[in-house]
Image (cartoon, rainbow, N blue to C red):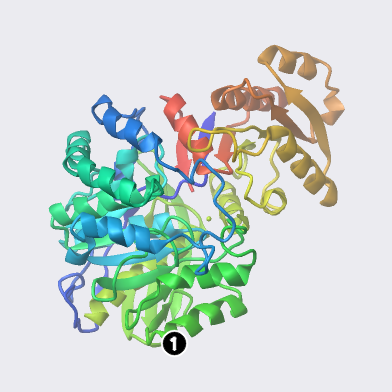
Amino acid sequence: MALAFSSVHRLTHFEMKRMQCFTKFICPFRNLVKRTEILALTSGCSKSRSYSSVQEDNKISDLLDYMERLKNYEKLSVPRGAGTDSEDGFDLGRMRRFLEQLGNPHYHFQAVHIAGTKGKGSTAAFLSNILRQGGYSVGCYTSPHLLTVRECISFGKKGGHISADALINLFHQTKEIIDQSIELENGSLTYFEVFTGLAFLAFFQEKVDIAVIEAGLGGARDATNVLRNTELAASVITSIGEEHLAALGGSLESIAVAKSGIIKHGCPVVIGGPFESHVEHIIRDKAHSMNSPVVSACDPGIKSAIKCFSREDGDPYQTSDIRIQGRENLEMFVDLPDVKLRMLGNHQLQNAVTATCTALCLRNQAHTEASAEGLSDVIRMTCPDGMFAFVVAMATDKDHLAFARKILTGPRPEIVLLTEVSIAGGKSRATPASILKDAWRRTAADLCLDFMDFGVIDEENNLNKLISCTPASRDNKIIILASCQNLSVCDSIKIADQLLKFRDRDKSRLIVVTGSLHIVSSTLAAVSKVDEMIVS
């Protein structure tokens, strides 16, 4: 059995062969792209997220206990309109006052700010690696974490995440200031605001040359959006999709407005895409109003293609060609044949192109349906002849029907097992497995697919009884079932594998764990050894 993980952007390695560059550099990052090459290897925030059974260090228990007492919107439902640049939006003044108490650490390093519905974590990983291989000391701040909060903060020329000792020392060093800030803000300072402040302070103390910072929610009112244009090297908007709708204004247009809020006056903005035309107009209009040059990763002069899928030391990778010849606002040229990407799929190739455009932009200047479609691409490449099953858990604010439709119109699964996991330690944002099952049943029926509803499975014995009662004539139907609350994700994976064996014991089997970063985190924490991991 092979085990695949989807919706994990930051777990993989990035290998870029040679980058020949022919334009002159006019910015502080002039050594980033010399006339010879950039080599981006398996390093940085992507590598630091290992597959080992990492547990939270006992050394940082004081910090974790303290943070648990703060308001955490990853656990709670985000208030309606909280991510919009309006009266309903989060108060950035609170974050600015907190950073001022810390000495405004973010004034002391250059930064790239990345927002987007999907792809921002992958793009952050790619870009961090390119910058490190250019010889720079790079800070990288991403969220949420999978196994330990230390994953969110990485720095240095090797890109390892912050050590337990460094993090707890940082906390003890600042605890009095945090206490005072919480009191001054009448207890309203949040988990994300405090942790973002600690990340910025860590980057300042480590004297990073540049930080790659991923926005948490939206952009305009996100706690990371306190960077001034004097420190902002570039803004990046990877994609716009219907996620966190209520928090971001209720429409694709309002989401675009919220995310374009990270654009600062005179600072270049790189847009990933592809975007719907009216959505791209919103971003471009904002950039125009801020006198910010726009670089599009979908420029007609940019060509990229996956050539083949291969393995190296047992690890899968795709070989791709990337050629960038952009002249829209900043003239850029680079030709990258045979780029090895261990993030798989066309969507990850697009993220790599976006990161490369950003690196070139730095030199020159001086996350849904889309993820489901990308996952289908990966399955086509990695499991062309075998059987596969989906184990799915999703949050309540996702578009369950659209995700199911994209999955079911791709390569046909044998099994779909719906489950649920805690999100940030709580169940309030988790969609019940029975509701997910109804969404997948409706979608399968709408697509005129043959399926069989196995109901709710509460234990493996119940499954054995169902299998024994299943006529052989139904073997070609998609089996859709839900696990009950007392079954773990690992139990669900075992059940899915057992059903695949029942179908055909001799065929290769792939279990795809998808739908949420949190289900992947739960699985990684519980599974110590798997035959294969393919991260999309």
Q: Could you tell me which residue is drawn at 17 percent across and 63 percent down?
A: 209
Q: Is residue 186 above or below residue 430?
A: below
Q: Toward the viewer: 313 or 112?
A: 112
Q: Which quadrant holds the N terminus?
A: top right
Residue 192, percent across and down? 38, 48
Vertical side of 6 occupied by 307: above or below: below
The residue lying at 70 percent from left, 54 percent from top is 402
Can residue 40 be seen here? The reply is: no
Relative placement, left or right, of 442 versus 369 is right
Q: Residue at x 41, y 55 (%)?
A: 122
- Indicate the position of residue 286 as horizontal and vertical percent values: 47, 81
Quadrant position of residue 281: bottom right
* Image quadrant assignment for residue 14: bottom left
Residue 423 vertical placement versus 123 (above, below):
above
Q: Nearer the viewer, residue 220 or 276?
A: 220
Q: Residues within 10 Å of mark 1 (few under 14, many from 20)?
A: some
User: Residue 47 location in percent, x, y?
Assistant: 30, 45
Q: Residue drawn 80% across and 36% down?
A: 477
Residue 518 as seen in the image, left or right of residue 165: right
Which kind of residue does numbered mark 1 sit on? His
Closer to the camera in the image, 103 or 285: 103
171 above or below 272?
A: above
Q: Is residue 357 visible?
A: yes
Count of labels in the image:
1
- For residue 301, which quarter of the picture? bottom left
**Which structural element holds mark 1?**
helix
Q: Give the residue number, with chain letter if any, for mark 1.
A: 288
